[in-house]
Amino acid sequence: MSKPLVVILMGSRADLEHCAKIADACKGFGLESVLRIASAHKTPEHALSVLNEYEADGRPKVYITVAGRSNALSGFTDGSVSAPVIACPPPSDSFGGADIYSSLRMPSGIAPAVALEPFNAALLAAKIFGVANAEVRGQVKASQKRAAEKIIADDASVR
């Protein structure tokens, strides 16, 4: 089976730190990831070219899109690819946080998932791959076990 690929597509270089957290979490699940920059607003032809490049790659893939404010990138990506898309917008206080709605409300037929934390975006990608990949499924289970063990240890430390 081909190694799964997570394509992390950011709207601008300003999103790089957020995307690096996603890439690190992907690595923890044994997933290969690539970072790319393309804007649905400013460079739609380039964005489509990037998406077409990865769509031509036969590996199983998930796209994680990172764009804030008016998040057209997630909808644009979802409407252009057949693989799952996860929107993971960077944190923002703009507009009192109301800019998150551009990631949550999509037109009919456009259905990216939304995960607000970088680790959770990678976890969701791993769970998607884990449906058909026992190795990735094992990484997810190991991560869940580590999280549970931490809670038990924290509980013991406060008694």
Image (cartoon, rainbow, N blue to C red):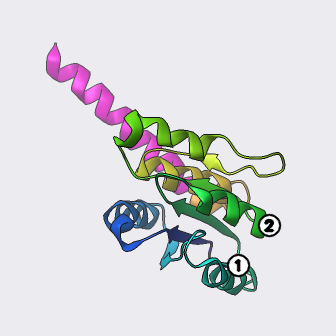
**Is 138 inside the magenta-drawn segment?**
yes
Residue beneath the point at 34% across and 35% down: 149
Q: Residue 118 vs residue 88: left or right? A: left
Which quadrant is home to the C terminus?
A: top left
**View extreme (right): residue:** 109
Q: Residue 111 vs residue 136: left or right? A: right
Q: Residue 148 vs residue 106: left or right? A: left
**Is 76 inside the magenta-drawn segment?**
no
Instruction: Please say if 34 is above or below 78.
Output: below
Quadrant of residue 44 within the rendered picture:
bottom right
Instruction: Please say if 96 is above or below 49.
Output: above
Per the rendered image, the range of residues in magenta is 137-159
Which quadrant is home to the N terminus?
A: bottom right
Residue beneath the point at 47% across and 36% down: 98
| Disc marking residue 59 | 1
The front one of 111 and 159 is: 111
Q: Give the structural element (helix, strand or loop) at label 2.
A: loop
Q: Nearer the viewer, mark 2 or mark 1?
A: 2
The front one of 53 and 101 is: 101
> Dot 2, how many residues are within 10 Å of its Cα: few (below 14), some (14-19), or many (20+)?
few
Instruction: Please say if 36 is above or below 9.
Output: below
The front one of 74 and 131 is: 74
Marks 1 and 2: in contact by CB < 8 Å? Answer: no
Question: Looking at the image, can residue 121 be seen?
Answer: yes
Residue beneath the point at 56% across and 55% down: 71
Q: CA distance from mark 2 to mark 1?
A: 12 Å
Tell me the amino acid under the disc marked 1.
Arg
Tell me the amino acid under the disc marked 2.
Ser
| Disc marking residue 82 | 2
Q: Residue 145 vs residue 133: left or right? A: left
